[in-house]
Amino acid sequence: MQCRYWWIFTVMDYVVTSDPEPPTYCERYERTSLSEDGTTAEYKFVYTIPGDATPINDTCTFDAVDTMIHYTCADYSSIIFYLTLDYINGKHCLVGHTNADERTHIQYYYLIINPDSEVSEYKKCYEKIDGYSGGSVTSMRDP
């Protein structure tokens, strides 16, 4: 099973997925650094690979470049995933997508929020994610 939609917090313990039976560990994110200009952030990731339930610990870097976010992970060596920004709600949240899995043509959507904003400010972004998934979104949290 693969996670297909993520809800990203400063300390990532929530995931939004369209999978009706999501695994315990989908992508989990914890920000470890942020550049002075706010365009580059490093995260600790914990994720699984389809077909293997063993959690993988990784370090990934997000770089904001124009209307895209590039992210690279240590386990994926030199591969850069391009996150296209689809919707931005001021400084509160944004929604983006990427085609990270070329073999299965799965389109991954991301909801990235500003932890300093009020939860009510995320509503418009959450509605976008819900619309992209056809209303089939599950919010999950590890115990």
Image (spheres, rainbow, N blue to C red):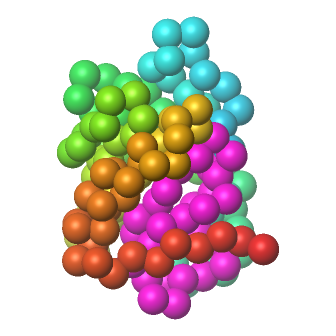
Q: Of all residues shown, which one is farthest toward the right?
A: 143
Vertically, is 12 above or below 66? below
Residue at image point 49% right, 83% down: 1
135 sits to left or right of 75? left
Q: Which residues are magenta?
A: 1-29
- As for residue 137 lying within the magenta part, the answer is no
| Near-viewer residue (114 or 56) | 114
- Identify which residue, 8 or 65, lies in the foreground: 8
Which quadrant is the C terminus positioned in?
A: bottom right
Give x and y (percent) for residue 82. Answer: 30, 42
The secondary structure that most of the magenta stretch takes on is loop
- When asked about the image quadrant of residue 81, the answer is top left
Residue 13 falls inside the magenta stretch? yes
Residue 130: give x, y in percent of width and height.
30, 68
> Is residue 80 visible to us here?
no
Seen from this angle, which residue lies furthest top?
A: 36
What residue lies at 55% left-to-right and 65% top-to-bottom? Answer: 15
Farthest residue in the bottom direction?
21
Residue 124, x across and y down, in percent: 31, 51
